Image (cartoon, rainbow, N blue to C red):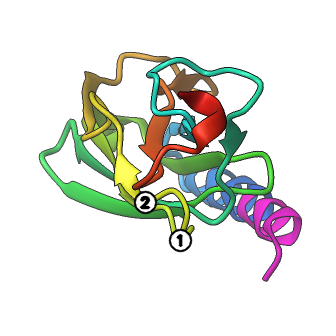
């Protein structure tokens, strides 16, 4: 399934879920987490014109809710290197804290995780409808191209 279609289906799912919760007298809450995955071609720890986004990279997001439930999400980056996790749930069960971490880049040329890209833990304090942005996860090639040296 392509990314655009998956995003449309996710938006429809969130709308239906919110409608069902509100119809049952439960106050709905919607949260979103998003970030980007990039190939640092020169391995210089800075994003420059030689670097590019990684489509199809896998990211795991683990969240603990206010009620103590553990939710595990799997996301893949789109053609712009962006991954998104979104959920609608009762406000009493909303996310409290989350951990986002890269799983795989699926690109033969850019497979080594960059420094500081092992994962990000954060509290989720946003009201319903807001999004939390994660710093980019960076992969590097095993061998730096000669034009970078």
| Residue 17 relative to residue 42: left or right | right
Which range is magenta? 1-10
| Residue 19 relative to residue 8: left or right | left
Marks 2/1: CA distance?
Answer: 6 Å
**Total count of labels:** 2
Mark 2: which secondary structure? loop
Q: Name the residue under label 2.
A: 111
- Residue 60 at least partly seen: no
Q: Mark 1 points at which residue?
A: 108
Is 75 placed above or below 82 here?
below
Q: Nearer the viewer, residue 69 or 113?
A: 113
Q: Position of residue 72 (x, y in %)?
A: 30, 62
In reply to whether residue 6 is colored magenta, the answer given is: yes
Quadrant of the rendered image containing residue 17 = bottom right
Q: Position of residue 71 (x, y in %)?
A: 28, 58
Q: Position of residue 31 (x, y in %)?
A: 52, 36
Mark 2 neighbour class, 10 Å CA radius: few under 14, some 14 to 19, many 20 or more = some
Q: Where is residue 131 in the image (x, y as percent from the top left)?
A: 58, 26
**Residue at (78, 60) in percent of width and height:** 7
- Residue 147 at least partly seen: yes
Is 85 placed above or below 17 here?
above
In the current view of this chain or complex, which residue is farthest to the left?
Answer: 68
Q: Which of 143 and 49 is in front in this view?
A: 143
Q: Nearer the viewer, residue 99 or 89?
A: 99
Q: Which of 39 and 44 is in front in this view?
A: 44
- Labelled disc at residue 134: none
Dots 2, 1 in contact, CB < 8 A: yes
| Residue 121 relative to residue 91: left or right | left
| Residue 106 relative to residue 117: left or right | right
Q: In which quarter of the image is the N terminus?
A: bottom right
Is 89 placed above or below 120 here?
below
């Amino acid at each position: 399934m392509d990314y655009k279609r998956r995003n449309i289906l996710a938006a429809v799912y969130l709308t239906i879920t919110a409608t069902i919760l509100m119809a049952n007298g439960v106050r709905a809450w919607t949260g979103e987490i998003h970030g980007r995955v990039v190939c640092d071609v020169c391995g210089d720890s800075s994003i420059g014109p030689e670097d590019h986004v990684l489509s199809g990279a896998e990211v795991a997001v683990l969240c603990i809710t206010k009620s103590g439930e553990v939710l595990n999400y799997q996301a893949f980056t789109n053609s712009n290197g962006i991954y998104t996790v979104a959920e609608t749930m009762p406000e009493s069960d909303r996310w409290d804290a989350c951990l986002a971490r890269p799983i795989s880049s699926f690109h033969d040329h850019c497979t080594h995780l960059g420094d500081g890209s092992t994962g990000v833990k954060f509290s989720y304090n946003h009201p319903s409808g807001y999004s939390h942005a994660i710093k980019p996860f960076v992969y590097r090639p095993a061998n730096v191209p000669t034009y970078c040296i």
